[in-house]
Image: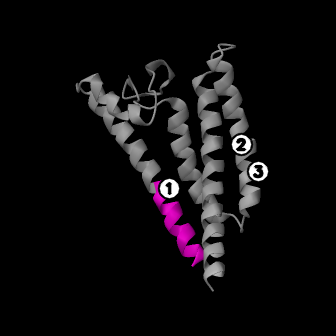
Amino acid sequence: MKLAIQRHASLALAGLSASILAASAACSWLVGHGAPSQLRLLFRLICHGIPARCLLLFGVPMPICARCTAIYGGLIAGAMLFRLLPRIRETTARIVMVVAVAPLGIDGLTQLIRLRESTSSLRVATGLLAGMAFALWVLAAAGTRESQHVHASV
């Protein structure tokens, strides 16, 4: 049962992330081929989409920033990595997530308080790391919660 929940959770996480990335790429293609740039506004629900902080695709800024693009990619990579790892405890995954998210937080905070301006490569690196760690934690937690529920009902 635990493996089935984790399998479904990893497919859902990777599928949702891939859908967002695909929609973002499609939006970039459409805008790059003449669609109005206001099409990018649809993505404001999930990201600020500041053009200067977005990766270029098809010669136009993607509608989600470099960090969010990497986070979604990291969620996909983390879901795949989870399937390859031996059993990982939720507590361990939570610690890994906190450590992995720290560079993203430091990068974002130092930029927010105008101490320095981050770069796209740093945004991608910190986003990818955070996304992968978050996926590992969510999937480990899904298995833990399911086994606790099953044991409590028996």
Residue range in magenta is 1-14
Pick the residue in front: 49 or 79: 49
**Amino acid type of disc 2?**
Ala
Instruction: Give the residue pinned by disc 3.
Output: 95
Kindly identify the residue that appears in the image at 53 percent across and 45 percent down: 73
Is residue 67 within the magenta segment?
Answer: no
Q: Please identify, in this view, whether the residue under mark 1 or under mark 3 is nearer the observer.
A: 3
Is disc 2 surrounded by few (<14), some (14 to 19) or many (20+) residues within 10 Å? many
Is residue 10 within the magenta segment?
Answer: yes
Chain-order first, disc 2 or disc 1: 1
CA–CA distance between discs 3 and 2?
A: 9 Å
Task: State the SS at label 1.
Answer: helix
CA–CA distance between discs 2 and 1?
A: 19 Å
Instruction: Give the residue pinned by disc 2.
Output: 100
Q: Is residue 4 above or below residue 135?
A: below
Q: Is residue 143 above or below residue 61?
A: below
Chain-order first, disc 1 or disc 3: 1
Q: Please identify, in this view, whether the residue under mark 3 or under mark 2 is nearer the observer.
A: 3
Q: Seen from this angle, which residue lies furthest front? A: 153
Task: State the SS at label 2.
Answer: helix
Is disc 1 surrounded by few (<14), some (14 to 19) or many (20+) residues within 10 Å? many
Is 104 situated left or right of 91 in this image?
left
| x, y percent for residue 1 | 57, 79
Task: State the SS at label 3.
Answer: helix
Kindly identify the residue that appears in the image at 75 percent across and 59 percent down: 91
Most common secondary structure along the magenta stretch: helix
Splitting the image into 4 quarters, where does residue 130 fall?
top right
Instruction: Give the residue pinned by disc 1.
Output: 13
